[in-house]
Amino acid sequence: MRDRVTELELIRASVHEGPDPEATEKQHAKGKLTARERLDVLLDSGSFAEIEAFRRHRATGFGLERRRPHTDGVVAGWGRVHGRDVVVYAHDFRMFGGALGEAHAEKIHKVMDIAEAAGVPLISLNDGAGARIQEGVTALAGYGGIFQRNVRMSGVIPQISVMLGPCAGGAAYSPALTDFVFMVQDTAQMFITGPDVVRAVTGEDISQNDLGGAGVHGTLSGVAGFVYPDEVSCLEDVRYLLSLLPGNNQELPPTVDGADPPDRLNEVLLDLVPADPAQAYDMSEVIREIVDDGEFFEFHAGWAGNLIVGLARLDGQVTGIVANQPSNLAGVLDIKASEKGARFIQMCDAFNIPLISLVDVPGFLPGADQEHGGIIRHGAKLLYAYCAASVPRIQVIVRKAYGGAYIVMDSRSIGADLSFAWPTNEIAVMGAEGAANVVFRREIASAEDPAAQRALRVEEYRRTLMHPYYAAERGLVDDVIDPRRTRVTLIGALALLRAKHAAAPQRKHGNPPM
């Protein structure tokens, strides 16, 4: 027995060391950690339990029978983050470039099934070149099994994809099906077809980073929600995100006892937000003033900046925040902002995270580009997500809320549980100037002094239909609150709605505007 145990220890040490010191040096030279080094950063010290460390492929041909390293290029198992269980797998680029073969895929399938059965988050550390070409269609079938599990577990357990190297083809589709995508600048890329194929088909010469780097997916495509300069800071924020999420859809997010008093008043808000609806300000400063300790974990910070989404805590309770950003495109809703908001709202609803909407929106962005790009369909995604959400939903109208955008930003009419407004609120079909031009068009045109008549009618419309208490008088706003009491009001409302339960209609599933 002692001899066998000694043999086991030697083999295990060889597995942990990896295939070739030179391959490890090449990985480090690119600014990348090895799979096991990444796990050391991600997981609590000493908590990783590996499965199938001795797994080898059984493929033959093209020299594969002479290359059968243990693990088959993926390290898989479970561990803990902040003392809570997670399941994880990490591609090892030093073996077959992290490419997926039959044995490799079966290991991933196994840990995915374990994550689903245990009801714990699944984290993938991606650094693979796609399907292993030498294994043919069996490699493709392996990806199919991953995709099917991604979809089956969607909304059941949190799925986090961390992009740490080049990921092409099927290796890019699985992250797109998960809840959160993290990317590291310069070293991580995602694309369906690489630069060589693009060059052969279209004649376009483009680099990997320009085609599918973190900058592209963090600012243009919106595929990546989080972008970082290095792997360590990236993995540390994965740990932080996990501290804000429940283990599965049957649990509530973890609460903490914070030092920020729940009755703290927000004096600075009186000076931070201008009363003039045309004057810009930074809504992120409003958010950080309201939430616990000023900590706000923003999603998609580099994409669709006219809408802010992210997670924070209020009196220790995790809360999702959706807010218009007046300092970017005046806070209008457009195609990208609608998609960004809809995706975030669906995630919060799936994992029992209450929603707070801070509204200061002039409407939807007009223009032929938006109309031809499908603003109707994309805007409907945001509307659908809000209407379908069954978690506690609270609306705060900070200043203006015009037209259809007011309805879409979680108004009472589409199911918000509570709606509050600051005394600077203006809720109307459109701004007073635009409304006067439509309603009194002929009268203004025929007046001796059109400018004076227009100013008179603008003021009349504003005084009659846009005063701060018009919506409250009609029950569309539950209360007009002192901005200094915004934090206190929201914490009280969240405490009331904590046990909210909404019965779902009997149907197979909805048919949202995809």
Image (spheres, grey):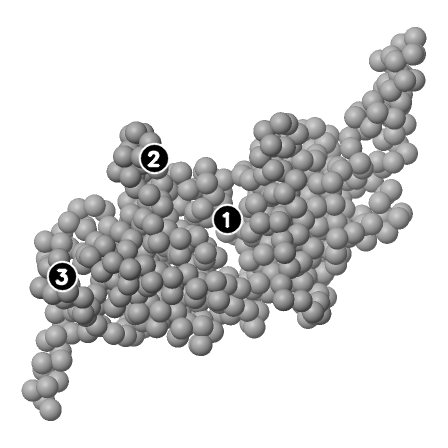
Q: Residue drawn 25% across and 74% down?
A: 52
Image quadrant holding the N terminus, namely: bottom left
Of 478 and 185, which appears nearest the observer? 185
Instruction: Specify whether 20 is left or right of 106.
Output: left
Any mark on residue 210, and which?
A: 2
Instruction: Specify whether 296 is left or right of 41.
Output: right
Whether tag 3 and tag 1 are in contact, CB under 8 A, the answer is no
Q: Residue drawn 63% across and 32% down?
A: 371
**Disc 1 or 2, which lies upstream in sequence?**
2
The amino acid type, in three-letter code, at marker 1 is: Phe
Q: Which residue is mark 1?
A: 299
Of 379 and 253, which appears nearest the observer? 379
Instruction: Specify whether 441 is left or right of 86.
Output: right
Quarter location, residue 83: bottom left
The amino acid type, in three-letter code, at marker 2 is: Asp
- Disc nearest the viewer among 1 and 2: 2
Furthest residue in direction bottom, as rendered? 1
